[in-house]
Structure formats: structure tokens, C-alpha cells
Amino acid sequence: MLTNVNDSRVPSRATGAPVLTADQLALWQSFVDGGWALMAQVNSTFGAHGWTTTDLRLLEVLGTREQFGISELASTVHMGVSTVSRQIGRMIDTGDVVRVRSDLDGRHRLVRITDAGRDTLERITAVRDRVIREYVIDVLGEDDFTTICLAMRKVRTSWA
């Protein structure tokens, strides 16, 4: 039974787990709504250039090493193997990525970013940087931007 809705330690009726206070819920909803609105702007801007945020994420990660297996790449970018596999197939068609044989096991196929893929990544990151500057940094200021980014790093590393 709820006794004080402003106490974050108040158990929920159904599970006994702590529930969000009204203020916490309002803040969370603002965070989620702002995040979705920002992603809509990013997706719209990227789409105007024929790119997706998935393109950016995959090329960013592929650019960090010589080659990746699809499963390892999917795990690294927090996406499903089938999603990454389809996306990589499209990137192979555009020349941004190539398949290569593993030196350890010739049956195992790996993927590698091409020079064309590095050029695409450079163009995408230039657009990304403009979008982040306009819609986030210029709105929040450097200090709030840093605070939010460090907070998200803390969230991410809390279960890593």
C-alpha cells in the first residue's frame, strides 16, 4: 500500500519494488520525450542524405579495428545479428564494407570497412557533429552537455 508518493522507497502495489515519485516520473518522461524528439531530428537530417543512424554506428565501430565477425559487431553495437547482417549486406552493395576470410578459420567470414566506407563515415560524422551542435550543445551549453554525457556514461558502465 502506498503511504507517501514522494518517497522513492515506497513499494509498488503489485511487486513490492520501489516506484518512481511523481517528480521522478515527470523528469523521466521529459528525458524520454526529449530523446525521441532529438532522434527524430537526427533521423530526418540523416535521411535527407540517404543515411541512417545505424549506418553511422556500424561504420564508427568498423573503423576502430581491421575486421569484425557479424556476431561480435552486433554485440558491440547492441543490435540483433539479423539486423546487422542485413545492414552490412546493404553496405557491401554500396562499397562501404567488404567481406573477408578469417586467417584463423577460412570458413568464417569477417567484414572490414573500405576506403569508401571511411569517406562515408567522414561525411556522416560531419553531419552528426552539426546536428549535435545545433540541437544539443547550442541549446544546453557546454556544462549541461558535459553533465548529461557523463551521466549517460555512468549509466552505461553500471552494468558493463
Image (cartoon, helix red, strand yellow):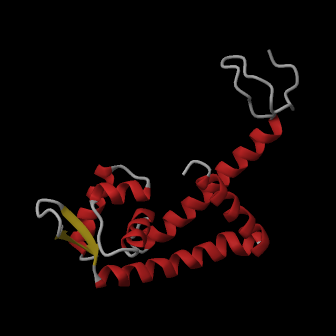
Number of marks in the rendered image: 0
Residue at the top extreme of this rendering: 1
Residue found 80% across the figure and 29% down from its top:
9
Q: Nearer the viewer, residue 106 or 79?
A: 106
In the image, is 139 to the left or to the right of 155?
Answer: right
- Name the image quarter holding the N terminus: top right
Q: Looking at the rendering, which quadrant does residue 119 occupy?
A: bottom left
Rendered location of residue 115, percent (x, y): 30, 85
Query: Which is nearer the eye, 53 or 110?
Result: 110
Residue located 76% across and 69% down the image: 140
Residue lying furthest left in this view? Answer: 106
* Rendered residue at 73%/22% (across/down): 12
Q: Position of residue 10 (x, y in %)?
A: 80, 25
Q: Position of residue 104 (x, y in %)?
A: 17, 65
Residue 96 appears left or right of 33 = left
Q: Judge whether 54 appears above or below 20 on screen.
A: below
At x 41%, y 69%, the residue is 61
Is 30 rendered above or below residue 128? above
Q: Quadrant of residue 113?
A: bottom left
103 or 156, which is in the foreground? 103
Q: Position of residue 143 (x, y in %)?
A: 78, 72
